[in-house]
Image (cartoon, rainbow, N blue to C red):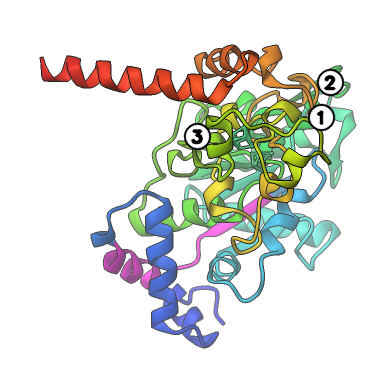
């Protein structure tokens, strides 16, 4: 299919029905918190859209982000949409190598100046010698590629916040994308790895509305990172009743009780895992019996042990963390929190009625 084909033409050539496509648009609009009335316009805009040129740079990373995005069960529409961007440069996925690969990047930057999306996974070592591609340091390649990008999407926690390479003692003096690029819109899609739908949702939003979605204070799309895991967790009723697994093989664990005392960071981790889930909605870490390690939050590697309860107060410093720590330290933790939240709601309703 020609590079300038529309997305609609590409979908039809793949045998994707209009009905399946509308279903994808409905799901995407829903998770992006867009009104349902926008779905037909979204579908029309997506069908007419040309594939945007995408340059994907991989720096200090483990390839988990790319794995996550390519391991969706084919043929999902998210996968197809992702295929139908014009992925003009990607170290892991492209066929070209050596000089030809670098020429593809340069050509895409030249032909789509000001229009291409730059996706980056991995952190950037500021000691240039630590990581180079085609003899170019990661730092120089990022600056060069970002100069004419329409926007930059930092994929995964390493690109968004520095991730594992930046964890103490940070031997490569690694930094995040936003530590280097300051004059372009930057969207952070953290996670170790990030949820594929967050990626396709952001791209679909950009293609249909021509804008980037609303972001939170950490540069993450609010639609996917606006709620913490805890508030959508199916084990929450156990937390609220103060029923906690104390070990991974006790009766509480077998009964699916809350993993808070086993180090779950769900109360302080903002991500869509609990409702979007992974692998076509099959599961997410907590459903598999392991607490959330807070992989979508900055500095999570250095924020205390994976199995240490956040009641120890090492995971971040926000007010929500203080609340969770305070409540978690007491017996009947969830019940107390629930009571307090009800009291606060009542007080707010009372104030509003005055
Ligand atoms: Fe779920 Fe973790 Fe919250 Fe327990 S502490 S309800 S396991 S998110
Ligand atoms: Fe990461 Fe926690 Fe989700 S560990 S994948 S944010 S459940």
In the picture, which quadrant includes the C terminus?
top left
Q: Position of residue 239 (x, y in %)?
A: 58, 32
Q: Quick one: SS at disc 1? A: helix
The outermost residue toward the front is 251
Are the residues at dot 1 and dot 2 in contact (C-beta closer than 8 Å)? yes
Residue at 79 percent of width and 27 percent of height? 307
Q: Relative to the observer, which residue lies in front, 273 or 340?
A: 340
User: Quadrant of residue 68 in the image?
Assistant: bottom right
Magenta run includes residue 53 = yes
Do we see residue 290 in this rendering? no
User: Quadrant of residue 18 in the image?
Assistant: bottom left
State the CA–CA distance, disc 3 to disc 2: 26 Å
Residue at 52 percent of width and 50 percent of height? 275
Q: Which residues are magenta?
A: 39-56
Labelled disc at residue 170: 2
In the picture, which quadrant includes the N terminus?
bottom right
On whether ligand 2 comes within 8 Å of the CB at mark 1, the answer is no
Residue at 62 percent of width and 38 percent of height? 190
**Circle 3 sits on which residue?**
184
State the CA–CA distance, disc 1 to disc 2: 6 Å
On whether ligand 2 comes within 8 Å of the CB at mark 2, the answer is no
Left or right, residue 44 beside residue 265: left
State the CA–CA distance, disc 3 to disc 1: 24 Å
Residue at 35 percent of width and 69 percent of height? 43
**Circle 1 sits on which residue?**
165
Q: Position of residue 59 (x, y in %)?
A: 77, 41
Q: Quick one: SS at disc 2? A: loop
């Amino acid at each position: 299919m020609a590079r300038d084909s529309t997305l609609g033409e590409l979908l039809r050539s793949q045998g994707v029905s209009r009905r399946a496509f509308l279903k994808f648009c409905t799901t995407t609009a829903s998770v992006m918190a867009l009104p349902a009335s926008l779905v037909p316009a979204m579908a029309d805009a997506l069908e007419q859209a040309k594939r945007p040129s995408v340059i994907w740079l991989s720096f200090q990373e483990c390839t988990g982000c790319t794995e996550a995005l390519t391991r969706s069960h084919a043929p999902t529409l998210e996968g197809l949409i992702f295929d139908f961007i014009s992925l003009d440069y990607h170290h892991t996925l492209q066929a070209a190598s050596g000089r030809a690969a670098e020429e593809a990047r340069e050509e895409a930057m030249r032909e789509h100046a000001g229009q291409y999306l730059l996706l980056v996974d991995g952190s950037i070592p500021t000691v240039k010698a630590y990581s180079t591609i085609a003899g170019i340091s990661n730092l120089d390649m990022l600056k060069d590629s970002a100069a004419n990008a329409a926007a930059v999407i930092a994929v995964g926690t390493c690109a968004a916040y520095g991730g594992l390479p930046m964890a103490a003692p940070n031997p490569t003096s690694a930094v995040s994308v936003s530590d280097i690029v300051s004059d372009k819109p930057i969207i952070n899609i953290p996670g170790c790895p990030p949820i594929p739908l967050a990626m396709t949702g952001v791209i679909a939003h950009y293609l249909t509305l021509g804008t980037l979605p609303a972001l939170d204070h950490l540069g993450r799309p609010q639609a996917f990172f606006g709620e913490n895991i805890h508030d959508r967790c199916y084990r929450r009723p156990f937390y609220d009743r103060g029923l906690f697994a104390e070990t991974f093989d006790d009766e509480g664990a077998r009964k699916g009780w809350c993993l808070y005392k086993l180090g779950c960071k769900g109360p302080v981790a903002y991500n869509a895992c609990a409702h979007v889930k992974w692998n076509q909605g099959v599961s997410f870490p907590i459903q598999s019996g392991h607490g959330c390690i807070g992989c979508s939050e900055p500095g999570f590697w250095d924020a205390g042990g994976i199995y240490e309860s956040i009641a120890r107060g090492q995971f971040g410093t926000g007010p929500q963390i203080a609340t969770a720590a305070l409540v978690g330290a007491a017996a009947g933790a969830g019940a107390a929190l629930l009571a307090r939240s009800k009291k606060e709601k009542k007080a707010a309703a009372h104030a509003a009625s005055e």
